[in-house]
Amino acid sequence: QALAGYSKEVWDEVVTALYYGVDISPFIHAHQNNPELLRQIKWGLVENLDARLLAVGDAEVLRKIRGLASKGVDLENIHSLPLQAIDREVLDLVLEWVEKGADLQGYNLRVLSLSAAKAIGPHVVRGEDLREFCVSLRGTPLYFNSLIHLKANGVAIDRFLETLWAEDVVVFLAHHANSRFISPLLDVVTPAFPRDVTEGVFALLRNGISPDPLLASGSPTEWPHEFHFGWLLRAKEAGLDLAPFSDASLSEPELAALFDSKVRLQTTIKRKLRK
């Protein structure tokens, strides 16, 4: 009579549980509409799974945990995990890591995004420490993979995990992670920098040109254009004074005219010096 009102499926689980000598009655009321979860709990009790794992609240997850146990996987690594608080898709990946022997101590999996989990998984399994990726930042796998590459090349990545940068900028930085100009570039760029400006600044640094005057000359709402960086590089190659070209307010025709006048003046001076 204690089971009056419950479905036949629930009755079946109770009967088979009794047959195997386990008691699922503490779980019946909470999971009366989920006989599959009761079935997994029943088998978990039969297999002496830790009570903390039985409380996961998801039949498929519990089935996977039972599968790990049957393979002889050490489940101690997940006993202390907040299984119910972890994103379901992230948890599926975490269980795969556990099967491969990953050490998850210190990983705050409650806030780990699926994109970050997809990126760090192979590295975590290899024993790399990527605990700093357990943040609520919602980047793409490409974003996080780029950060992993930066970190592997000795670049501090804290700033990219505190604020979401433009993905194409982070990809560009990762591509040049082993450049000797990456450090001065990171001293200049901010989360507001678009990709083309980042590339332009990098080009100036590689050619020994400080980007500060050009960047300082722009307005707060408008960045220097690609042609500004291009004319600065041409002026450097021509041996001209760079100061007049470090003006983001100049249009491309104005810069072209400025360049021509400076080159003509330079040519005239050189001729006079040769006389």
Image (cartoon, rainbow, N blue to C red):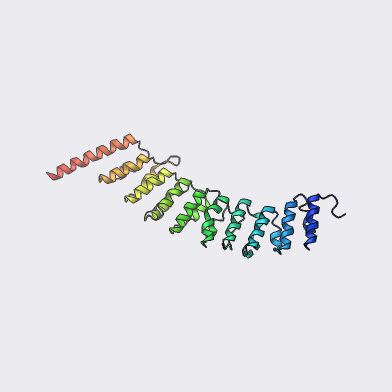
Residue at 45% in and 55% down:
150
Tag count in the figure? 0
20 or 203: which is nearer to us? 20
Query: What x and y, as percent, mark residue 123?
Result: 51, 58
Of the 4 image quadrants, the one containing the N terminus is bottom right
In the image, is 239 to the left or to the right of 118? left
Image coordinates for residue 134, horizontal then vertical, percent: 56, 56
Q: Residue at x 22, y 40 (%)?
A: 265
Q: Position of residue 262 (x, y in %)?
A: 25, 40
Left or right, residue 174 beside residue 42: left
Location of the C terminus by quadrant is top left
Seen as rendered, the residue at the extreme left is: 275
Residue 80 shows up from this direction: no
Nearer to me, 41 or 140: 41
Q: Position of residue 95 (x, y in %)?
A: 61, 57
Query: In this view of the protein, can residue 160 be seen by the observer?
Result: yes
Relative to the observer, which residue lies in front, 117 or 208?
117
Residue drawn at x 27%, y 39% is 259
Which residue sits furthest top? 253
Left or right: 84 with respect to 138? right
Above or below for 206 versus 224 = below
